Amino acid sequence: MKSRTNHPIAVWSTAALTALVISLTPVGSYAAYAQTVTEVKGTVSTPASASTAAAPGRNTTVPPLSEASKQSTRPNVLVIGTGGTIAGQSTDATSFQSYRAGTLAIEDMVGELPNKDKVADVTALQFGNSGSSAYTMEDLYDLSLTVDKALETYDSVVVTTGTDTMEEIAYFLDLTVQSDKPVVITGAMRPWTVIGSDAQANLYNAIKLAGSGRTASFGTVLMLNDTIHLARGVTKTNDYRTDTFETPMLGAVGYIDEENIRIYRAPLRATKADGEGKPVFDLSKISKADLAKVEIAVSYQQAGGGAIKGFVADGAKGIVTAGTGAGGISREMSAARKEAIEKGVVFVTTTRTGSGSVYGGGEGIISGDNLSPQQARILLLLSLSFTDDFNTIKGWFETYGTPEV
């Protein structure tokens, strides 16, 4: 436990709490199909019973390796299912956008994959079965520790999630999982049960990549659409297209072409000696109660300062500004930021443009370099969960947040 003034448990907005309450089916179950969130053409509707339904528990019990797996020469891969479109059940085989996300059990999905025994011995764990945005930071805390626990036994881990907040979940894991073994996150833009779904290919290729060991010491990587991205910098660019994930400025790190796994560049941490690239954010050293509340304020034409003031009043310890151009914010937002800094709130500057570096920081302000606002929030949240010292946090943004060669 760190020595500092304790941060309050994260305070969630009504929308976030609603998303949590309407979390989808009970873990690994087809039976409660009717209680899942229905995603229809990009919208989420709440079943009538959802308002009184409790959020499902998260299964963090890592299954032991079978005796057969222990004797096998193939790599042992654990697939951790969390729901999302990849586990979606469509109304019919051509309903690409009308389906229930987080419905199918990950064990059944893995069981349906052909020829997986050619690349790995695969075991499944149903951590949860929800849309990605339904998971709280406390859930991600549990997920990260579960991944690390699994990697004590398994050779690698695949995590399946919804794509809406996949880039945030991936970056959280990238910054917190302590093992150097491969962690691959995947999902799908079309549900499992439609014709032409990308779900099966993405899951198979993620297992293949994880089992290959090619991304050891890379941290968490994404594998969708035959393309491999580092967690840091990746973003979802389209709400429907299967090639939605891109890494602006830097690009993908590799591709899977049938049997060929091609890696063209590596992150800085992969070039360091064993242990030197390990993330500083070891969640086993803090509790969920230490997780800081951090928000994002977007600037626009004549933007007011009310959002920043409201976030501060609501207990935010840090705020990321998504500014215009290279990080600029309005006069009113700037005034509100100055007041907040005087109260001890830490700010990180980013751009709303989708790519590009930003202005340098200032008193109480840290430059987010080319991190997206949502990924800068993850890094600031973790930083404030471990320390209140501004210079330490600034140093983490200049190293972990900006891993220059």
Image: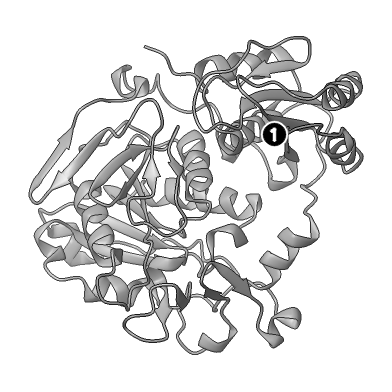
User: Residue at 39% across / 52% down in the picture?
Assistant: 150
Foreground residue among 89 and 275? 89
Q: Which quadrant holds residue 387?
A: top right
Q: Nearer the viewer, residue 323 or 164?
A: 323
Which residue lies at the image location 41% right of the left edge and 31% below the top edge?
248
Judge whether 395 appears above or below 374 on screen: above
- Name the image quarter holding residue 234: top left
Q: Position of residue 191 (x, y in %)?
A: 37, 71
Rendered position, 186 above or below 3: below
**Residue at label 1?**
385
For the residue marked with disc 1, what is the amino acid? Ser
Residue 64 percent location from the top left of the image: 34, 62
| Left or right: 34, with 93 as reference point | right
Q: Where does the C terminus fall, quadrant-wise?
A: top left
Up the image or down, 90 lies above or below 374; here it is: below
Is disc 1 placed on a helix, strand or loop? helix
Looking at the image, which residue is at 40% across and 19% down? 276
Nearer to us in this view, 163 or 243: 243
Q: Residue placed farthest to the front in the image?
A: 301
Query: What's the coloring here?
Result: one colour
Circle 1 packing at 10 Å, graded few (<14), some (14-19), many (20+), is many
In percent of width and height, residue 65 lies at: 28, 61
Say whether residue 213 is visible.
no
Left/right placement of residue 239 relative to residue 300 reads left
Q: How many marks?
A: 1
Determine if residue 215 is in view. Answer: yes
Residue drawn at x 80%, y 61% is 14
Decide which of 233, 220 is in the foreground and name it.
Answer: 233
Q: Is residue 190 above or below residue 287?
A: below
Left or right of 3 in this view: 173: left
Considering the image in quadrants, where does the N terminus appear? top right
Asked which quadrant contains residue 81, the reply is bottom left
